[in-house]
Amino acid sequence: MGQVAWKGLFLSLFDYKTEKYVIAKNKKVGILYRVVQLSILAYLVGWVFVVKKGYQDTDTSLQSSVITKLKGVAFTNTSELGERLWDVADYVIPPQGENVFFVMTNLIVTPNQRQATCPEVGRTEPLGPQTPTKPGSASIPNAVCQKDGDCPAGEAVVAGNGVKTGRCLKDRDSIRGTCEILAWCPVEKRSKLKKPLLAAAENFTVYIKNSIRFPKFKFSKTNVLATNNESYLKSCRYSTEHPYCPIFLLGNIVEWAGSDFQGMALEGGVIGIQIEWNCDLDKAPSECNPHYSFSRLDNKFAEKSISSGYNFRFAKYYRDAEGVDYRTLMKAYGIRFDVMVNGKAGKFNIIPTIINIGSGLALMGAGAFFCDLVLLYLIKKSNFYRGKKYEEVKSSSRKSLSSPALNGNQSPEQLGGL
Amino acid sequence: MGQVAWKGLFLSLFDYKTEKYVIAKNKKVGILYRVVQLSILAYLVGWVFVVKKGYQDTDTSLQSSVITKLKGVAFTNTSELGERLWDVADYVIPPQGENVFFVMTNLIVTPNQRQATCPEVGRTEPLGPQTPTKPGSASIPNAVCQKDGDCPAGEAVVAGNGVKTGRCLKDRDSIRGTCEILAWCPVEKRSKLKKPLLAAAENFTVYIKNSIRFPKFKFSKTNVLATNNESYLKSCRYSTEHPYCPIFLLGNIVEWAGSDFQGMALEGGVIGIQIEWNCDLDKAPSECNPHYSFSRLDNKFAEKSISSGYNFRFAKYYRDAEGVDYRTLMKAYGIRFDVMVNGKAGKFNIIPTIINIGSGLALMGAGAFFCDLVLLYLIKKSNFYRGKKYEEVKSSSRKSLSSPALNGNQSPEQLGGL
Amino acid sequence: MGQVAWKGLFLSLFDYKTEKYVIAKNKKVGILYRVVQLSILAYLVGWVFVVKKGYQDTDTSLQSSVITKLKGVAFTNTSELGERLWDVADYVIPPQGENVFFVMTNLIVTPNQRQATCPEVGRTEPLGPQTPTKPGSASIPNAVCQKDGDCPAGEAVVAGNGVKTGRCLKDRDSIRGTCEILAWCPVEKRSKLKKPLLAAAENFTVYIKNSIRFPKFKFSKTNVLATNNESYLKSCRYSTEHPYCPIFLLGNIVEWAGSDFQGMALEGGVIGIQIEWNCDLDKAPSECNPHYSFSRLDNKFAEKSISSGYNFRFAKYYRDAEGVDYRTLMKAYGIRFDVMVNGKAGKFNIIPTIINIGSGLALMGAGAFFCDLVLLYLIKKSNFYRGKKYEEVKSSSRKSLSSPALNGNQSPEQLGGL
């Protein structure tokens, strides 16, 4: 007897249970449902699968390596520096050719600085009656003094170049003077830049070699065109006509970023070179190509920012015959280029496909739910359909018929249909 | 006839089919189901949508550009270097102001090194009876020798400074000596640091300008407050009261990272400055603001690590009148600051919304499944409900009634209900 | 009366509505359905949850900080430089020990360059009859000239070293000459490299310290083994036997990257050191360990690329007794190491779990839909089952019986069953 029951249990495992449906021969709701179904299907196929490639697994954490190399020389002839030629070793900082490189386009040189005392204001002339110009100490409020006591010895000048020695240097007959400081003297002059020194940098070229790898898909590529035509790679320049040439003219880069090269060369700035790899790895590797875009990164608040443009100071150190160090301070203005690599690769994968199909099917359920609401509560004969859809059973001994009675009690279903 | 059939087929396409439900007037299960529904709804709305913003598409691959600029001077007076003033060009390495910058706070200088031969141990005095201290060769085991044969010519000293010349330099009467090496001589002395040279670096400031861009949403912003008050941006210091001021006091950064500046200045270290952009782009762009946090990156195993702290060696090269190169070797200790930018932007997008609603609805189905189990197998009258829910049909010629017989055979359904 | 209706409405809220199922005692479809169910379950458990860890929330945007430190010395004896010892301060560029570092392995030195005029071709000898070799001007086509007019003054030589002075320098009796340029003279000689200068770099070691942080999970770790055995960390070398030792032999790194060190040292190259953190944070933190891999980043198109290998130029600037600058230009070849850190951490989270279960359940629905198709249209008695599953109701006054009539009209359902 028990064995029979177990056998029944086992057999019933393989009975197929399927939901019972009620066919409501209502064309309005039927058409509505088909429309909803088609919309969901169109959305799923068109948007999720075709446009968003929802059937793909994506990898956005790419590994990237960038090598950059500049070419070009510039000749300058200034009263300060005389005739001078600038080559790569002079104007590229740092020299290593990494993804961030700086091209010097302007320069304030303060030669022969030595550890000594001098006035804080940027004036190299001796103080005397022949210099009627008031020291520009207003620009460093902390260095303005009227007596020695205003310059406490050992105190660093705020936003200045050295520490006060305790003396206040004044022009004769002048009330306000400037503190004497211990510093690398003479201090840098605050000069107004008129035109960039290395205006010729506009014609320099940069070769950018970018190797990328999508670790999830073990896919590698470089931005250098796989061509055998070596002379093409030597002579080409990136442009819309040559989208896969890895050599860029600096002037073009700045122009494409929406800036003016000469203006930028004067005050300095930062240009972003975005390399975007948007690869569909279900296609051939040769269709995975970089897309370049250029933008200026520092200009948004350039007018009001405390450090518009881009500059930094560095020094070259020398030692004289007596073994005393001196240096040439350079305030370098120029354009920093940040090569930023960004990418996404997609490849067919069953999991996102299933998640997207699954949520599409669940959406069908939501559509059916919406049409049910219309059928059961919004159309004229909804009472009738409600009675058909919901079969009331009570655990009373009196068996209800399978076609439930249509009575006023059905109306409470309105809230319970969810 | 065929045309009629096709017309029927076409018309039936627009019949609406809806699942037939059985109303079980069982309040216990009904309440249970409502509770489950409400829980799922609360989870979906509260957690998925409100807290986790599940209706948003997110972009975590932001592009970032960082410009840093240090300000401050320090005065030192040591027996080795004399009175000396240090400014930005002296203590910032590299000078370019990128996202990683190093502020030198301590220094071991070995001046006037020339290519020559000298003992490996860091002793500059001539070997003689007046130097009773044993050479500290224990610290470089590979350089300890008893006879010339222990110093094979041309072999590099492991963890040392040069290659052996083949001679063993010994104090008279001493058994153990040290190999002579060809190196930049004299070699660096192993001195114990007592206090940081540039303790004043605590008061240096750094201006950090960070421009970010979320490529997916084409949204750009910088961390510099969009204010017209230029003097505020010149004089402010970042603190909890001034969360959008981009100027930081080095001492504060180290303190917020949970370290002691003077201790760190002595041995060096690495501080991470995390800038976090957590932007809800459904709101106004002005609500997308950076959040700064500071942490020490090198301290976890500082006690036991082979290179606790942070230091590196570099040299300044000079040439004397005879054209011979010599150099000043510097072992620089200091604090490296890594500005790390990290961000996430979210914006309403229909796809994650649909995925989340879809999985929420599917969850409702799981809830219904759970309540079905209760109704069909756990309550007293489950047999009755089971009979009502499952309508048995056999493909026998004898038609079963729509209200299925309640018999013992129903029990096998127990496992088949899934 | 209204109150009674409201009460009924309220009570009916807690009626439990459950879908009515039809049990089709068809073993074939039943077994098919169970197979489909089991497949989906196996896929969900095995692939989604066990293999892909679909129950975890993942964080792929890790923050990373890298400190590198090289050790090793090399001795060279060349006719140009004489006996010379190279230590860390000489061959590591930049010296700071960041995640990208360059080890110089070969060098073309052009000493004593001064601002002057000289021929563009790389020949330092004075032009005269004793130099019968034709200037190698073919390599710089733009510098080839026949008369002074071919060298317009002030024009920069394309791919050259300076600007033309307007003179064409020719050997006597020679037709073709080379333009005279203003440049850092003498210009660099184009010499063919035979063997790397610092071949000994193969035995240098690099210590890589990598601290990572997964911001989403606030989890930090470093790659330095948390051991108290300090001497182990001083003497170990990374290998498959010592996978957690952070000290690497350069020669090994290059070998593991699939390259030949001596060849690479000659022409330069870029090696990527990938550190991969693949952490299951549901396990103990000690199970979250780095995995290193090494790859060459520049070799793919090495043969045909315009700049195979890796090199860059930099200069050391000196000042002579008269205060005139001169420099030593170095063209440094070597290996750049890019330490790239990449990682993923996963931790149990309810949301992806629910999304995955939800889409699994939705998939069950898709399975049921598929089996329905089989039951209703593909098996012999599908007409019968179709009649049982779909209960036709018409909103006619005549009530249809609950067991719908089996007639030919059912066939149109074929398309409508979706």
Image (cartoon, coloured by chain):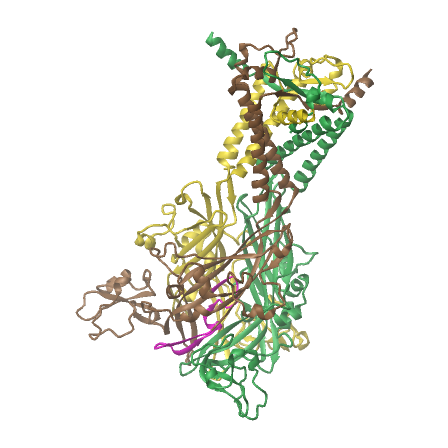
Chain colours: A brown, B yellow, C green
Viewer-closest of A415 and A142: A415
Residue C198 appears in the figure: yes
Q: Which one is nearer the viewer's eye here, B114 or A293?
A: A293
Tell me where residue A35 sits by quadrant: top right
Q: Is residue A155 left or right of residue A21?
A: left
Identity of the residue furthest to the left in this view: A173
Pick the residue in front: A383 or C127: A383
Give left or right: position of A230 versus B387: left
Residue A204 among those drawn in magenta: no
B331 displayed left or right of C392: left
Could you tell me residue A163's position as x and y percent? 33, 65
* Residue C281 in picture, x, y percent from top left: 60, 43
Image point (82%, 15%), residue name: A1
In the image, residue A85 lies in the stretch drawn in magenta: yes
Residue C122 position in % (x across, y down): 54, 82
Where is the C terminus of chain C found, in terms of image quarters?
A: top right
What residue span does the magenta drawing correspond to?
A: A73-101
Depicted A51 relative to depicted B190: above or below:
above
- Please tell me which residue is depicted at 78% across the width and 16% down the height of the picture: B397
User: Does residue B36 appear anywhere in the picture?
Assistant: no
Q: Position of residue C127 (x, y in %)?
A: 52, 89
The answer to whether residue A146 is above or below residue B27 is below
A25 above or below C286?
above
For residue A350, above or below residue C292: above
